[in-house]
């Protein structure tokens, strides 16, 4: 606090000026409303003004803000984007991997199988396996870490990035399941329902449905935890 500001307020009070007049004089001279209010509090209150926990932006040495919430939000955003990104990656690769296996087990009679086509399919299988092997453990580790953070601090369940990504995943899953059902009904009405199509629809329904159910239960339990808290 500027000593000249404190001295002026003391001098003005000694001259009989009230708070409103002193405040107006200081504001008209260019002082900030926050500085004026603080100097009045220093003179009238026995305790100093408390600082907000973790949410203040008081400048520290070098002019850098302390207690900013932005680094924490950036950290949460990074962790959740990595977690849900790995979730979408391994789930998509796992679905495509099973689709390729179904194509091998039930080949389309209209397509001729050649050595080059077989090698290309095997290459796709190896690529999808590599993606699943890398992304699935990343998802498990990151998701376990985020769940532990929510258990330690239930306030983290209210994070905007967590809610947005969670419900966005539910939306994508619901759209996927709806498209799966529409495809089945269409080919059923066309009379072209095959075993291969049924197996692919079953794989898609099993993986996407399991993820949607798990995420829905997780978000619901976190909402109940928030309501109880």
Image: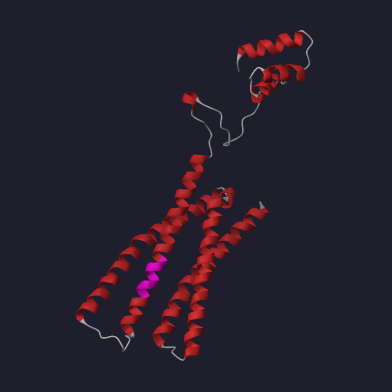
In the image, is residue 74 above or below residue 57?
below
User: With 152 as the anchor, is 98 left or right in this view?
Assistant: left
Q: Quadrant of residue 15?
A: top right
- Taking the magenta stretch, the answer to whether it contains residue 128 is no
Viewer-side residue, 34 vs 44:
34
Dominant secondary structure of the magenta stretch? helix
Image spot of residue 178 (x, y percent): 53, 75
**Residue extending furthest bottom?**
191
User: With 12 as the anchor, is 135 left or right in this view?
Assistant: left
Image spot of residue 224 (x, y percent): 64, 58
Total label count? Answer: 0
In the image, is residue 198 above or below residue 142?
below
Residue at position x 39%, y 57% from top?
Answer: 138
- Which region shows up in magenta? 91-98
Residue at position x 53%, y 39% from top?
Answer: 69
**Residue extending furthest left?**
115
Tell me the colour scheme of the image: secondary structure
User: With 107 as the anchor, is 157 left or right in this view?
Assistant: right
- Taking the magenta stretch, the answer to whether it contains residue 94 is yes
Image spot of residue 55 (x, y percent): 58, 36
User: With 226 as the anchor, is 94 left or right in this view?
Assistant: left
Image spot of residue 10 (x, y percent): 71, 11
Residue at position x 56%, y 65% from top?
Answer: 216
User: In which quadrant is the N terminus drawn?
Assistant: top right
Q: Quadrant of residue 47?
A: top right
Residue at position x 53%, y 59% from top?
Answer: 166
Viewer-side residue, 104 vs 224:
104
């Amino acid at each position: 606090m500027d000593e000249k500001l404190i001295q002026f307020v003391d001098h003005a009070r000694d001259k009989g000026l009230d708070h409103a007049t002193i405040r107006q004089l200081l504001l008209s001279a260019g002082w900030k409303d926050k500085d004026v209010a603080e100097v009045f509090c220093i003179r009238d209150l026995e305790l100093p003004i408390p600082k907000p926990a973790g949410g203040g932006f008081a400048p520290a040495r070098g002019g850098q803000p302390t207690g900013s919430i932005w680094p924490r939000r950036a950290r949460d955003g990074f962790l959740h984007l990595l977690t849900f990104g790995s979730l979408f990656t391994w789930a998509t690769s796992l679905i495509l991997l099973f689709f390729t296996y179904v194509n091998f087990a039930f080949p389309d009679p209209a397509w001729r199988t050649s050595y080059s086509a077989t090698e290309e399919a095997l290459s796709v299988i190896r690529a999808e396996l590599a993606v699943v092997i890398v992304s699935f453990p990343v998802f498990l580790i990151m998701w376990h870490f985020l769940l532990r953070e929510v258990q330690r601090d239930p306030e983290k369940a209210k994070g905007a990035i967590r809610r947005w990504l969670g419900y966005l995943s539910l939306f994508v899953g619901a759209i996927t399941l709806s498209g799966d059902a529409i495809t089945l009904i269409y080919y059923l009405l066309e009379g072209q329902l095959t075993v291969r199509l049924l197996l692919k629809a079953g794989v898609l329904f099993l993986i996407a449905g399991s993820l949607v159910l798990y995420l829905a239960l997780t978000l619901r339990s976190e909402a109940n935890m928030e309501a109880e808290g």
